Image: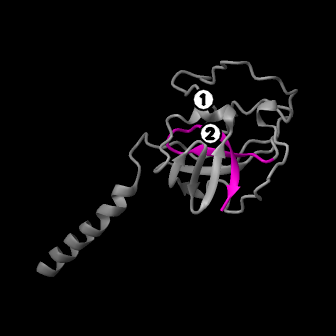
Amino acid sequence: MKTLQLAFATLLVLAVPAIAQRPAAGEHHEIPRSGPGPIKAEPHPVEPNRNYSDKPGHPNAPHVDGKTWVGHDGGRDDARYHMDHPWAHGRFTGGFGRGHIWHLGGGGPSRFWFNGWYWDVAAADIAFCDGWLWNSDDIVIYEDPDHPGWYLAYNVRLGTYVHVEYLGM
């Protein structure tokens, strides 16, 4: 009987760290299966002070609602994301989409990192990442089909995303 109790106690002690690592309900959003598709509609300029909150309770920042990337509708000619030299620091090859979740290691919008890769947030998007925890949030990187040189960093905890540039290793 003591052996069974000892085995059970050992199992409980080993299970606690695994349970503790699971996020509690409401602490993360569903990770999109894929990034946004290219804009097929007529591109339009983004109005200043745009409200991204498409439904009650949704953030006033670019976010993902199911399969819809709310706020990713400016098209290829969006001057806010124009780069004279796209991919000047090379292309990110670490992996894209929900199978590759990256843990932020520090920094801030002007320079942040994970796994030895360095990034910065587009100037137009800095206001949209003010709630990000730069040393603990998990993000997922997606390719941006409309803006050469930019990627999209999706914050798993908040459900929001910003345009990011890969700065290299």
Q: Looking at this rendering, what residue extends furthest in the bottom direction?
A: 3
Quadrant (top left/top right/bottom left/bottom right) for the N terminus:
bottom left
Q: CA separation, marks 1 and 2? A: 8 Å
Q: Is 112 placed above or below 81 here?
A: below
Residue 1 in sight from this viewpoint: no
Residue 141 appears at what percent x and percent y?
A: 65, 51
One can see residue 167 in this view: yes
The residue under label 2 is which amino acid type?
A: Tyr
Residue assigned mark 1 = 61
Percent coordinates x, y for residue 150 in the rendering = 75, 45
In the rendered image, residue 109, in percent from the top left (x then y), is placed at 58, 42
Q: What segment carries the magenta color?
A: 149-169
Q: Amino acid at mark 1?
A: Ala
Q: Check residue 161 in the rendering and tell me which mark sits there, or answer none.
A: 2
Q: Kindly identify the residue that appears in the image at 62 percent across and 23 percent down.
A: 54
Q: Which numbered disc covers residue 32?
A: none
N-term-proximal mark, 1 vs 2? 1
Q: Looking at the picture, tell me which residue is in the foreground, 137 or 2.
A: 137
Quadrant location, the C terminus: bottom right
Instruction: Tell whether position 121 is magenta.
Output: no
In the rendered structure, are the residues bearing label 1 and label 2 in contact, judged by CB atoms less than 8 Å apart?
A: no
**Is 8 placed above or below 26 here?**
below
Q: Is residue 167 magenta?
A: yes
